[in-house]
Amino acid sequence: MEGMTPPPPMSLLAELTHRCPLQCPYCSNPLALEPKARELSTEDWQRVLDEAAVLGVLQVHFSGGEPMARKDLPDLVRQASRAGLYTNLITSGVLLDRDSLGRLADAGLDHVQLSFQDVDPQQAEIIGGMKGAQSRKIAAARLIAEDGMPLTLNFVIHRLNAERVPAMFDLAEELGARRVEIAHTQYYGWGLKNRSALLPTRQQLEDTERAVAAARTRFGNRMAIDFVTPDYYADEPKPCMGGWGQRFLNVTPSGRVLPCHAAETIPGVTFPTVHDASLGDIWEKSELFGLFRGTDWMPEPCRGCDRREIDWGGCRCQALALTGHAEAADPVCQRSTDRKLVDAAITEAATATETFVYRRYGD
Amino acid sequence: MTDTSPLTEERIPAFVRGTRLQHDRVRDQWVVQAPEKAFLADPIAAEILRRVDGHTTLRAIIDDLATAFTASRDLIARDVQAMVQDLAERQVLIWKA
């Protein structure tokens, strides 16, 4: 890879804000949340969206925090849409009403991914920490279905809701969703902080696998199902982000440009921002994006592994979080000398009590 | 919903909302944009899908392709039928008529 121009990225995760009315203890945001005062301006985001389209990005995912907390969201959707980007809104739905949906649809929004914490309202509230959130989400889903915009329901799975995966499919069908994501929690940042309370048992994982297989048979082509497993129970790591700096980039609320949403944990490197350079320059020339791109950076056992261009060594942030070394093999890999750390976490979770550290904005 | 009625050439395919064909200028290729994924349309698929506008019948699409590529109409009809049926099952296309 060295000296070669990397292929352009396919998708941009635009984290517009870290503000959010929910407090989910597995939030994918970093532990250090960014204040509103540091958020990019409307004009900054519009420029970034244009740069993304020129660079070759095909899809933009507006996320957060809760992206609907930004009043200028319809303007950003319009800008992205005009630039030819496919626009996806990743939302909790609690701020969505008929007017705001209408403005987004008029701006050209292509698709909504709506998150649910559970199908049981009380359990959902224990996770999200917001009273009345479930009924707002149901109302949001009905408005989206009525409008005709394609809808994906997203469920993050963990020990406290894994048994209700079959009911999640029922809810998705009832609400007219075309896609469902059954995504087991990934253990970085907040998820790692709360790992002992969230990690399911192997039995629970297998039950969710059966529920997904049954739903695939039941729905056929009527519903697309995306199933994400907890890699702690895998023998081989996932190809995180499709490889570092190969398909994906992330812009944080304050404008840092990252190869993945957890990359700010990587020590000893400068994080490029949209104020310093264009997305294209950052993608092609920054130290951060070159750090783990391709295979040249790999030590053993990745370097000599026949899967090195399949899983790209797994997840750098997970390697860092668990072993202290970002360039180590992802410790979920059976070839990693650190696999024992993952096995120990599974053992520890089996006897842990369920006490959460909530992700509260402004704490 | 899977539509199992036989495909006559009077039927009119359309892209379902949230799905579209798009030229990817940077990579000079055609892609189908869909919820949470973009997939490559090979050159034959792109020629067919460029003619899917929600108004044009399969008959007109096949005629137009046969003229444009001076190829056997039967062969083209078979390709078009197979592809639109597959994409309708995968919820990329719907039938307007």
Image (cartoon, coloured by chain):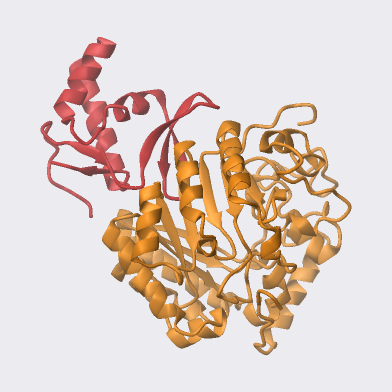
Chain colours: A orange, B red
Q: Nearer the viewer, residue B9 or A253?
A: A253
Task: Residue lying at the far top in this picture: please name it.
Answer: B70
Q: Which of the 4 quarters of the picture holds residue A165?
A: bottom left
Which residue is depicted at the point 32% across and 53% down? Answer: A221
Q: Which of the 4 quarters of the picture holds residue A82?
A: top left
Measured as percent of width and height from the top left, residue A79 is found at 49, 42
In the picture, the quarter occupied by the N terminus of chain A is top right
Which residue is depicted at the point 67% across and 60% down? Answer: A235
Give the tally of numbered discs: 0
Which residue is depicted at the point 21% across and 25% down? Answer: B61
Judge whether residue A64 can be spotted in this image. yes
Left or right of residue A175, residue A113 in this image: right
Left or right of residue A234, residue A267 in this image: right
Measured as percent of width and height from the top left, residue A67 is found at 54, 61
Judge whether residue A335 can be spotted in this image. no
Measured as percent of width and height from the top left, residue B21 is found at 37, 34
Left or right of residue A3, residue A47 in this image: left
In the picture, the quarter occupied by the C terminus of chain A is bottom right
Which residue is depicted at the point 80% across and 66% down? Answer: A322
Left or right of residue B87, residue A19 in this image: right
Measured as percent of width and height from the top left, residue A261 is found at 67, 56
Q: Nearer the viewer, residue A56 or A211?
A: A56
| Residue B40 in the image: above or below residue A90 | above
